[in-house]
Amino acid sequence: MSLRTRAPWVVLPAVLTLVVGASAASSATGGASDASPTAVTYDLLLRRGHVIDPKNNRDKVLDIAVKNGKIAAVGSKIDPSRAKQTIDVRGKYLIPGLIDMHTHLFRGPEDAYSDGVLGLPPDGFTFRSGVTTALDTGSAGWENFELFKKNIIDTSKTRVLSMLNIVGKGMAGGDKEQDLDNMNAAEAAKVAKKYPEIIRGIKTAHYEGPSWAPVERSVEAGEIAGIPAMIDFGSAKERTIEELLTEKLRPGDIYSHVYSGLRGELGEDGKLSPALAAGRERGILFDVGHGGGSFDWNVAMEGKKEGFWPDTISTDLHVTSMNAGMKDMSNVMSKFLAMGQPLKDVIEESTWKPAQALGRKDLGNLSVGSPADIAVFDLDKGTFGYTDSFGLRVDGKRKLVTELTVRAGEVVWDLNGRTAKPWKPGAVGDKTHTEHAAP
Ligand SMILES: [Zn+2]
């Protein structure tokens, strides 16, 4: 009897995995031709990579096959004759595509981050660092999210998610981000509920006044839409980090810029504020959000000493941060390696933990059926300098370098030309690839 005609409830446990495997393969190929062991089944096969996939507790050398933009198979030996394209990634780390939890991508002609010149167009800055999903954190607000979606989200290969700003105009700079009248929980929640897959949180940032309204309204909007709030605590002595983390935020809400030292994270005694541990105890998540002014080695090293590692690693990518100490996602991850954090933890904080924080458990993992968003890294050895936001440097012995990035099954970054044919006299290249061809 064919396995496919047998009712699932009569399948014996011993063959259950075989049935699951067969149905996954047949849905990937859409036909019965995969019954032949030599049939070409997969679009892409990445062979012999050291897979680190924290969700699935994988930490060993494996092959990963891709079909129709999804992970189709993971195994210790997948036959290369079954794949249209095979790339040998021996000696490299093969991990889920990174999720950058803090970026500014609403590039446009205005003067700040909201449709502004300080934002960056995603694809030029994500793939080269292994990032396949980037969370824009509040550049767009509930008044101009549609423009952000049309101009950036819908035109990017990078998967762009959003933390919608509680300020209607988003991060438009100066007084516009202080305008309490433009911070509206009901309006923000309404837009968030219209795009539940994309808008995965509510952001408040840069507020300088004494009022708790920006935080309270962000939490309120998050409560209505069923999503977390992310806090850039701005600046104001009247509002304390203790009250924020022990009273105002809910479990699952996110405190960004945790190592900035600008908002009471480090006490005058040189120790971390007890509010951080108290917040973690309550289930509040802590994000790096390195940026141009929010990573201080003094705070981070005290965090190491006290075992207070981040829940999520992120860049706070924008025009100035990427050209200063932050640089890019793999550089920020390498800083945590330099501090002595295990590679597996650094990868989890850049893949599976952000996926969970965003309620997007389809991302940040290499399960069969998940989107084929994959990063391949080298771990270079040498002496590397890692600078914080204040001109202080820590040297490290290892550096993550992005070798290959795959987004939805397509190779979108290939540092050493692994997908190219070696040149020799008379070789003919693919002339459909011209410099200015439309994507
Ligand atoms: Zn930011």
Image (tube, helix red, strand yellow):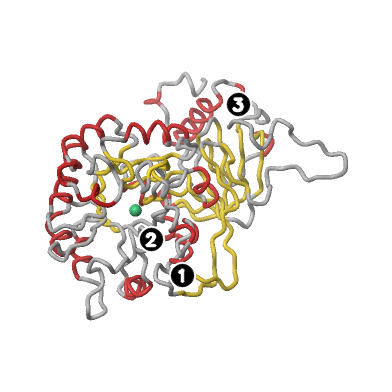
Is disc 1 surrounded by few (<14), some (14 to 19) or many (20+) residues within 10 Å?
many
Disc 1 on helix, strand or loop?
strand
**Image vertical order of residue 201 relative to residue 297, above or below:** above
Is disc 3 surrounded by few (<14), some (14 to 19) or many (20+) residues within 10 Å?
some
In this view, the residue in front, 131 or 123, is 123
- For disc 3, the marked residue is 34
Query: Of the residues shown, which amino acid type is indicated by label 3?
Result: Asp
In this view, the residue in front, 402 or 28, is 402
Q: Is residue 412 left or right of residue 55?
A: right
Could you give the CA–CA distance between mark 1 and mark 3, rounded to whole angstroms? 52 Å
Coordinates of residue 234 in the picture (x, y in percent):
24, 58
Residue 290: mark in rendering: 2
Q: How many marks?
A: 3
Residue 387: mark in rendering: 1
**Image vertical order of residue 279 relative to residue 132, above or below:** below
Q: Is residue 56 left or right of residue 407?
A: left
Q: Label 3 near label 1: C-beta < 8 Å?
A: no
In this view, the residue in front, 173 or 17, is 173
Using the rendered view, name the quadrant where residue 381 is placed.
bottom right
Earlier sequence position, callout 2 versus callout 3: 3
Disc 3 on helix, strand or loop?
helix
Q: Nearer the viewer, mark 1 or mark 3?
A: 1
Is disc 2 surrounded by few (<14), some (14 to 19) or many (20+) residues within 10 Å?
many
Coordinates of residue 85 in the picture (x, y in percent):
66, 37
Query: Of the residues shown, which amino acid type is indicated by label 1?
Result: Thr
Disc 2 on helix, strand or loop?
loop
